[in-house]
Image: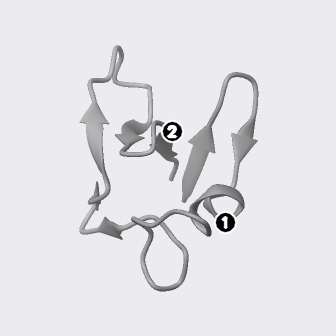
Amino acid sequence: MLVILTGDQILAPEQVCQSCLLADASGQPRWRRGQLRCGQAIRKLTEQQPEQYECMMGFRIAYIE
C-alpha cells in the first residue's frame, strides 16, 4: 500500500494525487513493478524502514506492506 507522508500526517494517495498532472488515469501514483515512476527512491537509513520515494511534486511516498 502506498501512503503519503507529510510532517505529522499520513495521507492516502487519493487525497493528493487526484489533482496531480503526473498521476495515472485513475488519479493514483504511477506505481509499476515495485517502483514509483513519478518520483525518485530515497535511500533507507535502516533496513526496517519502508521503501520511500520523493515524488516530482515534492511529497514523500512510502510503500508499506
Q: In this view of the protein, which residue sits in the foreground, 38 or 47?
A: 38
Q: Quadrant of residue 16?
A: bottom right
35 to the left or right of 29: left
* Residue 26 circle label: none
Please report contact status of discs 2 and 1: CB closer than 8 Å, yes or no: no
> Which residue position is annotated with label 1?
14
Q: Which residue is tagged 2?
A: 59
Q: Amino acid at mark 1?
A: Glu
**Front-most of residues 45 and 16:** 16
Q: Quadrant of the N terminus?
A: bottom right
Using the image, determine if residue 18 lies above or below residue 54. Answer: below
The x, y position of residue 34, in whole percent, is 28, 60
Determine the residue positioned at 51% across, 38% down.
59
| Picture residue at 27% right of the left edge, 38% below the top | 41
Colouring chosen for the image of the structure:
one colour
Q: Residues within 10 Å of mark 2 (few under 14, many from 20)?
A: some
Q: Residues within 10 Å of mark 1 (few under 14, many from 20)?
A: some
Q: Nearer the viewer, residue 30 or 45?
A: 30
Q: Residue furthest top?
A: 45
Query: Which of the pair 45/23 is nearer the observer?
Result: 23
Q: How far apart are the alpha carbons under marks 2 and 1?
A: 13 Å
In what element is the residue under mark 2? loop
